Each structure stands twice: as structure tokens, then as C-alpha cells.
Image: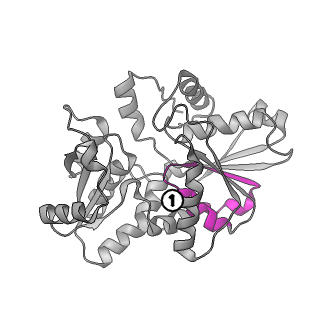
Amino acid sequence: MMQEQQVPTTRIQESLLTKADVSLYIQREELVHPTLSGNKWYKLKYNILKAREEGYETLLTFGGAYSNHIYATAAAGKLFGFKTIGIIRGEQAQPLNETLRFAQDCGMQLQHLSREAFQHKNDPGMIAQLQDQWGRFYLLPEGGTNLLAVRGCEEMGRQAAHYDVVCVSVGTGGTLAGVAMAMKGQNRLLGFSALKNGQFLTEEIHRLMDAYKGTVYHNFQIIDQYHFGGYAKFKPALIDFINQFNQRHRILLDPVYTGKMMFGLYDMIRQGYFSEGSRLLVIHSGGLQGIQGFNERYKNKLCIYSE
């Protein structure tokens, strides 16, 4: 059950890279599983194992209406035989968007909370109220980041030692913390934040590292200049970049995480940020399941080119 997966690594050939004398590779974690892809596979892996070992039959978690984590938890529940409950931020809208339709089709029961009530999702009183309502459940945090998620994401850094710089997208910090633990302080790790003012994540990532193994590494840097207005915000330049990259390389990026990371990385390469001869690895952390909902909401801005 949920054994370690092997994914391909693709080398990217571009005139920009040749001119800068850097090599760029993408670790294709978006291919790890058709519905439970990217970092979500790794974040859920050891949580699913623990839930099963402790006899839980139900997983409960939180997320927004377009949450990749809600989507992934619903998929994991269907795949591994758990009932799932999704507590969704904001009032219910009909018809359901693509993310929530998928979750519901997987058997997830959806409960909407007002945005004000959702802010108290971690309060003991709120958890007790949910237990009274739904019975015994295994609790997964919003976004899926906990110490078992860090343990899973550590496996995403298995190739990191072969590269001078490793790049990952950052939301809650769990993926970066896991990859950093795999790197053991060696080489450089860049985390491209999907949030405005992502520097606060440095402290949270250090906290996760310390709680996980009692060791804190400092070889990572948060890059937060490429958020395009904040979480899930975008501008035409980002969409154009994602579409052009996909057309050239047949590798799809998402507009919330990996698209912003790759846009930022290309800009940094263009500015001569990396030493000549550098070998760069980008870890593709998935998120592609959100594209259909994005196109539904914004009228097909993202094109999907296939072989």
C-alpha cells in the first residue's frame, strides 16, 4: 500500500538555458498517480498508514472550494477504503465546481462553514463539535501539512544530492521542510512562495524540521517576488508563460504553485542569478487537478497541449 514511487526526470532544453550555461531538470512528481498526484501523494502517504493502523474508518479535513488537498483526500479515501468528510470554507454555491464535484463523486461528504466560523477550525471546541456530529475520525489539517506529511515529502528529495540547486513550490511549508531534511543541509534549496510576504514561512519550516527530527537546516531560501498578487491570483503574463511552456515541452504547470515557480526561476536565470555550469532541479509538485476548475471559472485561459 502506497509504496515509494519512481517518477521520471525530464531535462529541459531552451536557448535561455544554453546562453546562461545552466542545466535544468524537472522531477515529474505530477505523474506519481493519476488522481493522487504530486506532493499530495507524499503528504497523505504516512497519514493514511497511521489512520489504518489505528483503526480509523473516516478521514476529516478542511479546505477551500478549489482546494487540491480536498480533492486529494477524497481520492485517497476512495482508493484506500476510507469514508471522507470535507469541511469547506464559505457558503455553498450551486452548481458545485469541478473540485467539489469530484470530491463528492469519490464519496466525500461536504459541509460548508462560513468564513468566520472556518477561522476557528483548529479550536478544540470546534473539533469536539465535529466529533459529536460525525463520530470518530482521523483529522488531517488544512493543506495536509503535519509531521507525517514532512516524512512523506522527505522522499521527494531523493534525487537532490545530484544537483547544485533544488526548487520547490511553497504553500504551507511541509513540502520544502521534507525536501530540506532529505538534503541534510547540502547544496541550495529555493522555495517559491505562492503567498504574499512568504518570508514568515522560514520560521514555520524551521519549526517543522525541529519537531520532525530535532535538526534545523538553513540551506534554503524563500523567494516571494513571484506571487502575482497573492494566493490563487494571476496575471496574463503568468498564463501566457504556462501556455507557452506547455506548448514547447508538453509539461503542464498549474497557475497557483508550479507555474509561478517556473516563471520566477526563468526570470532569475535571465538575470544571471545562477553560476555558470549550475545543475538545477525543479520538483513538480502537481496541482494539475485544479486546472479544470480554473478554466471553468476563468473561461479556458489555460490550454492543454498533449503529445
Pinpoint residue 17: horizontal percent, then vertical percent: 78, 36
| Residue 251 visible to an observer of this rendering | no
Give neighbour class at mark 1: few <14, some 14-19, many 20+ (Cα, 10 Å). many
Callout count? 1
Pinpoint residue 19: horizontal percent, then vertical percent: 84, 33
Between 306 and 175, the one nearer to me in the picture? 175
Quadrant position of the C terminus in the picture: top right
Between 228 and 137, the one nearer to me in the picture? 228
The image shows residue 122, relative to residue 100, as above or below, that is below
Q: Give me the residue at 40% from left, 39% from top.
A: 290
Between 87 and 30, the one nearer to me in the picture? 87
Pick out the residue farthest to the right.
276
The colouring scheme, among rainbow, by chain, secondary structure or one colour, is one colour
* Residue annotated with mark 1: 174
The image shows residue 76, relative to residue 243, as above or below, that is below
| Residue 40 visible to an observer of this rendering | yes
Instruction: Based on the picture, tell me whether residue 120 belongs to the magenta stretch.
Output: no
- Give the extent of the magenta segment: 155-183
Instruction: Based on the picture, tell me whether residue 158 belongs to the magenta stretch.
Output: yes
State left or right for residue 27 relative to residue 32.
Answer: right
Dividing the picture into quarters, in which one does residue 120 lie?
Answer: bottom left
Pinpoint residue 186: horizontal percent, then vertical percent: 74, 65
Q: Give me the residue at 17% from left, 62% from top.
A: 129
Between 183 and 218, the one nearer to me in the picture? 218
The image shows residue 238, relative to residue 290, as above or below, that is above
Q: Give me the residue at 29% from left, 53% from top.
A: 74
State left or right for residue 221 relative to residue 277.
Answer: left
Dividing the picture into quarters, in which one does residue 114 lie?
Answer: top left
Pinpoint residue 13: horizontal percent, then vertical percent: 73, 37
SS for callout 1: helix
Give, as a three-letter code, the residue at label 1: Gly
Q: Give me the residue at 42% from left, 65% from top.
A: 45
